[in-house]
Image (spheres, rainbow, N blue to C red):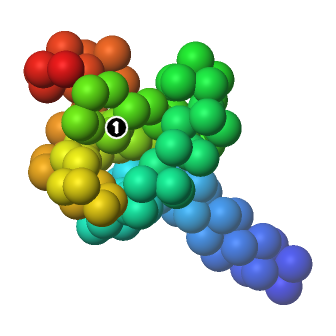
Amino acid sequence: MLKRSLVVPLLALTLLGAAAPRPSAPATVAPDSVPHSIAMFLANLSDGGKKRVGFRATAYGRHFFFEEDGGVTVYSYDGVGYTRDAFLKGSTLAAAMKKYPK
């Protein structure tokens, strides 16, 4: 009887824990600004957006695009480095590049 009184609450806690809602998507990791040399390094590391490296990145015209799970962060080149223009939630690299002229 003692075993049963311990097993039932333990089983209930286990089932409740398994049914708990999943946390929302992680916050973005893209920084507010990116130096030009770093932007080019990230774009090359991602092979111009062709390879996924936990993210995708590419430079196009005066813009730098950084894709992660939650969407794409768009940066503009100001002559020294890149500053954040927008975060396109749920967007892909290809879709974001179409929105910005070369």
Position in image of residue 52 (x %, y %): 62, 29
Against 33, is 79 above or below? Answer: above
Q: Quadrant of residue 35?
A: bottom left
Residue at 53% across / 36% down in the picture? 43
Q: Quadrant of residue 5?
A: bottom right
Please give the residue where the numbered disc 1 appears in the rendered image. 65
Q: Is residue 67 left or right of residue 9?
A: left
Say which of 18 and 94 sits in front.
94
Position in image of residue 26 (x %, y %): 42, 58
Residue at 26% across / 27% down in the picture? 61
User: Quarter of the image containing the N terminus?
Assistant: bottom right
Q: Is residue 30 visible?
A: yes
Q: Is residue 24 left or right of residue 62?
A: right
Residue at 58% across / 17% down in the picture? 50
Return the residue found at the far front: 79
Q: Is residue 89 visible?
A: no
Q: Secondary structure at mark 1?
A: strand
Say which of 19 and 72 sits in front.
72
Mark 1, Cα crowd under 10 Å, few <14 / some 14-19 / many 20+, is: many
Say which of 27 and 65 sits in front.
65
Residue at 65% across / 75% down in the picture? 9
Position in image of residue 34 (x %, y %): 38, 61
Against 83, is 13 above or below? Answer: below
User: Quarter of the image containing the C terminus?
Assistant: top left
Position in image of residue 2 (x %, y %): 84, 85
Q: Quadrant of residue 65?
A: top left
Check disc 1 and give the amino acid type. Phe
Against 42, is 90 above or below? Answer: above
